Image: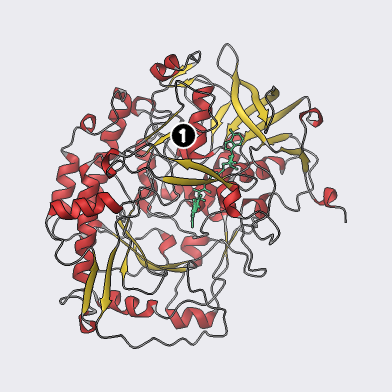
Amino acid sequence: IPESVLRARHVQTPEKLRQSYDYIIVGAGTAGLTIADRLTESPKYTVLVIEHGEFWSPSDPTGDGQRAHLYNLTSVPQIGLDNRTIPLGMGFGVGGSSAVNGMAVMRGTVQDYNIWAVLGNKGSAWTWEGLLPYFRKAIRFVPPDPVLAADFNITYDTQAAWGQYNDTHVYASFPGGLNPVIKTIYNGLRKTPGIPFPVDGHAGSHGVFYYPLSVNPKTRQRSYSRTGHWDSLNRSNYDILTSARATKVLLNKINAATGVEFILTGAVERHTVKANKEVVVSTGTIHTPQLLQLSGIGPHELLKQAKIPLKVNLPGVGANFQDHPIGASIRFNFTKTPPRPTSNSTHLPPSEGQGQGLVADLSLPIAAPLTFSAIASSLAGQNPASFAAPGTDRSVLRGYKAQNDLLAHQMLSSTPGSLSFLHWVIGYGTAPGANPINFHITSRGTITIDPANPDAPDPIVDYRALTNPVDTGLMIAYIEFYRRFFGPEGALAQYRAVETAPGAHVTSRKDLARYIRANYIPQAWHPVGTAAKMRREWGGVVDDELRVYGTKRLRVADASIIPILPGGTTQLTVYMIGEKVSLLSL
Ligand SMILES: Cc1cc2nc3c(=O)[nH]c(=O)nc-3n(C[C@H](O)[C@H](O)[C@H](O)COP(=O)(O)OP(=O)(O)OC[C@H]3O[C@@H](n4cnc5c(N)ncnc54)[C@H](O)[C@@H]3O)c2cc1C
């Protein structure tokens, strides 16, 4: 069967585009392809997706590899990290970041999403309960092999977490065996008082649980937005234009989106295409604020400096930038080697390195029983202006204050649905120890066009990592957690662990802070927040229907609308956003 019959249309030159489309989606990434698939289910609407990269397949051994399909970005020197610059990669090409990510499928807790409602407008449906149907619709969960499940105590709750929807081809599954070494840590956590073990970490609780991967269990290939929402679609109302970088959303006199301006790779001429109903920007957390700013939507001072005519003064565009930081590593050697755990599921291929695995996502009172309340008080007592980027608008500062108050409140709670703070991935490697990840940072960065060179292909990335001292305090608390867990009072004391990094002699706050500054990586490829779904008076960029404030017929739908990081990896949340906005748009 010719490929063209199996697919919607891949357009490679602007001349082959229609005169106009009902919907134009900018970015064929995780959310973008989800939305385009859902909108074109109805033959009533024509949809064009404009994508900067190309079609490619991560499973193609003759292809040019994943690295070639990442934006090659680097942050500005980080004042909180001894002026280190930080590289970051974002997916580039059809499938976006879902084509290159680590495939872990996770979700935040109940309060992670209830917080979105508090930060949003009145009557928001963005709560755990309100979003659960879209989460369920976003991904098809396939339970683990029963022998594997019994071997590693993998439990799941199909009813509460996953539901029975089956109209998606994006899968979450457990494709291989697990490294039995993790059983030593698992047993240690089991013996540690106070650590919760929810039946399924996707049902809204923090604690210790196994997570699946976005892998098709039959083919054992990556399952992502392209395989789930593009391949095999035969729809004449659906076009994708590739190698085309959107440079502007076109707005008329009443700031209604009328189309998109774009430039083909390697060319200089700018083209435009008309949208009859809506433009949906879905270019991800780094490029969405760039595109809005280039379109005249953003902080007025920045746009004035860049000589871009102001359409809407929205100071929050590019503010509120967050990612999960990977903290400085803490490592131990066991002087008495634990017996190597055995595995009954050896009929399954092993999954030694990065793969489906075990996580311990712990609330702050569990991770930091001695300091959680002092950390919470110090955050609640802060004036965000002391730590925000110079010149941050008052509305954005009000939003930061609202976020701080919510986080400070959650720092005191260990109820099942409350936020997890310390994220410990136990599936990677065999050495005891961790690179602790902080699920809820308090520093806020920025993404801005360069006013001196607004047409540069990528914007300026500034994490402002560790500019809020609370983040250093959290990392110190996590190091202390591991010292207790592996130390003489911990559940694995019999193996007499010796700390190798940073070393047992590094104990003062000053020395620990220095170690953290030198080794902290402010990103785990989960950037969010730069076009946040929050109240406008709190620096929000989109409303509860993901419409950009001050405009008409223009929405944003991707990771950038997430107002505050969830306690989980981000892809499932982004698929959920794609599912939800598709229904809002129709
Ligand atoms: C290396 C890596 C590892 C990760 N690991 C995990 C993981 O294990 N688990 C997990 O849950 N999450 C993970 N994530 C995060 C997750 O994949 C992302 O949060 C999610 O995919 C983001 O989706 P999005 O729709 O916001 O953006 P994307 O999927 O990145 O889509 C944006 C699209 O827009 C295109 N684009 C950008 N600018 C323009 C423009 N001007 N014009 C036209 N097109 C444009 C891009 O090429 C891209 O296709 C990882 C991400 C990366 C990069």
To which quarter of the image does residue 142 belong?
bottom right
Residue indicated by mark 1: 544
Residue 531 visible in the current orientation: no
Residue 295 x %, y %: 54, 21
Q: Name the amino acid, label 1.
A: Asp
Q: Is residue 484 left or right of residue 189?
A: left
Residue pushed farthest top?
253
* Residue at (76% x, 29% y) in the render: 14
* Residue at (54% x, 55% y) in the render: 136
Residue 586 x %, y %: 63, 35
Q: 496 or 404, which is in the foreground? A: 496
Label 1 neighbour load within 10 Å: few <14, some 14-19, many 20+:
many
Is 170 rendered above or below residue 70? below
Residue 459 x %, y %: 48, 32
Residue 225 x %, y %: 62, 51
* Residue at (31% x, 85% y) in the render: 338
* Residue at (20% x, 68% y) in the render: 483
Is 204 rendered above or below residue 498? above
